[in-house]
Image (spheres, coloured by chain):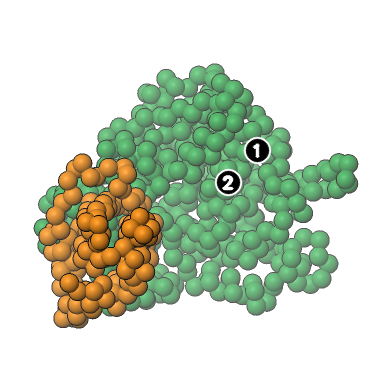
Amino acid sequence: MMTINEVQDELIEDFSLFDDWESKYEYIIDMGKQLATLKEEFKSEENIIKGCQSRVWLTATTDGDNLAFEADSDAIIVKGLVSMLVKVLSGHKPEDIAKADLYFMERIGLHQHLAQTRSNGLASMVKQMKTYGLAYQSINQ
Amino acid sequence: MTLTLSNELLNATKIREDFPILNEVINGKPLVYFDNAATTQKPRSVITALSGYYEHTNANIHRGIHHLAEKATAEFEATRKSIQTFMNARLMEEIIFTYGTTDGINLIAQTYGRSFLKKGDEILISTMEHHSNIVPWQMLCEEKGCVLRIIPINDAGEILMDSYDNMLTERTKLVSVVHVSNTLGTVNPVEEITRKAHAVGAKVLIDGAQATLHLDLDMQALDCDFYVFSMHKLLGPTGMGILYGKKELLDAMPPYRGGGEMIKEVTFEKTTYNELPYKFEAGTPNIADVVASKAAVDYVQAIGKSNIAAYENQLLDYATDALQSIQGLKVVGTAANKISVISFLMEGIHHQDIGVLLDQQGIAVRTGHHCTQPLMQRFGIPGTTRASFAVYNTIDEVDRLVQGLYKVKKMLG
């Protein structure tokens, strides 16, 4: 199992192969398409992170040790970004998730999407993932 | 596709030279700025007026006896005069400086509304209002027990005048409608709306935020009671707006904010208020932006509103045809009378994805609900992509938008 930073570094390396915006965004769109659609029952008010324009749904489950995330969005580029966040943070210990330093978005040059707090809910999603980390950390203790 | 606009109207190439920001390169491509309904870009003359004020004039206005205070006051009041002419208002003191359209509507709700409306009185707004012409009335209704009623629209995005006629009764005290819809581009028949409201004794407020750059304004002919707009959508600075109100109404209304400037005499027992327009301009106003606003009005008037409107209409027609040639694209808002705003949907593609991928190509549009959520509910859609044009936009730029959308389709198809 790779660490959170190893997954981030791998993503940064993947993206370093692209030399134009189109291939970069085509890759993100592909990742969005590949991410399994969340079952309708999980697309509840409880799991929604409302952006001004697009919506993100996030669920967390635990096997006792590690936290697993599933997520979805109604906009495909956001969904691609969501799938990257899930890939980086899912399957790790709650305390590692809570204290994770997410640097890959900035290194890939996608930081603008995290900064658009109001429009896409991505920043709130990261916050929510870390909150799950903190919550499960205290449960496990 | 190539088509040249009539050069007799205006020289867009030359006009573009007046707007420094249009030379920006975004994501490696020359900027195409189609977010004019959100805010317009500023000509150099406005930018120079703004910096020139701070370099050569800055002083607090009114009451100062030194040279700069007099100069600042003269320039500040020159803008008021220029706006009076621009709107063809009867009197200079009918022009109140605000912070923008939203501020103007809140001023009326909080002063006129709180003083003159009572329980059971009805306020009419339309389905296509911006949140800024909905929420202040909801707040007022909650406080005073007034009733907010919504004039319906048809599928083209036009007010249903028959319904409006039926809704007007002796209970109607205020009609507040948008002159031009920021989302649909619809130009509403504000003269008829005003005349009919007056026939039942109601007052009329027109939200002119989207209209001022595109349509001629004549307060005496229109005869509405209040008209509000923002300078930043009229090539002017942000944080500066205009409230026009008929003198007898403004005189009857209590002040909005208390403080300096708006008083005649203050004792701890009683304060008397200054006369119009100062009664509504408490505190040190936004002097620099007021002064620079005159440059914006001068600029618009030098080109001429009718030239601007004719040119923009050509752009709108060209863009509407070009966009509709894209398979799966549907225009939202097809009113017979509209200005240069095109909202659209693309089948199977989320508007946010469109916005992100156009931005990568240097094209700035707006996506979302455009602060008109009830209107989105009326059409049963979560949001649209909106391209809005101004006098410095060109056919070439519309072509770039069309090509950009083909690329979006290819990438997301």
Q: Residues within 10 Å of mark 2 (few under 14, many from 20)?
A: many
Residue at (48% x, 22% y) in the render: B168
Q: Quadrant of residue A98?
A: bottom left
Mark 2, secondary structure of its residue: helix
Q: Colour of chain B?
A: green
Q: Which residue is mark 2?
A: B104
Looking at the rendered structure, whether the residues under marks 2 and 1 are on a common chain is answered as yes
Residue toward you, B23 or B187 = B23
Q: Residues within 10 Å of mark 1 (few under 14, many from 20)?
A: some
Mark 1, secondary structure of its residue: helix
Q: Quadrant of residue B381?
A: top left
Residue at (65% x, 78% y) in the render: B55
Q: Earlier in the sequence, mark 2 or mark 1?
A: 2
Residue at (51% x, 31% y) in the render: B175
State yes or no: discs 2 and 1 in contact (Cβ < 8 Å).
no
Residue toward you, B182 or B379 = B379
Residue toward you, B361 or B9 = B361
Residue at (50% x, 39% y) in the render: B135
Q: Which residue is mark 1?
A: B111
Q: Quadrant of residue A29?
A: bottom left
Image vertical order of residue A102 relative to residue A47, above or below:
below
Instruction: Give me the chain letter of mark 2.
Output: B
Per the model, the C-alpha gap separating discs 2 and 1 is 11 Å
B218 left or right of B67 in image: left
Q: Position of residue B186 (x, y in %)?
A: 36, 42
Residue toward you, B86 or B135 = B135
The chain whose colour is orange is A
Instruction: Give me the chain letter of mark 1.
Output: B
- Name the amino acid, label 1: Thr
Q: Position of residue B111 (x, y in %)?
A: 65, 38
Whether residue B213 can be seen here: yes
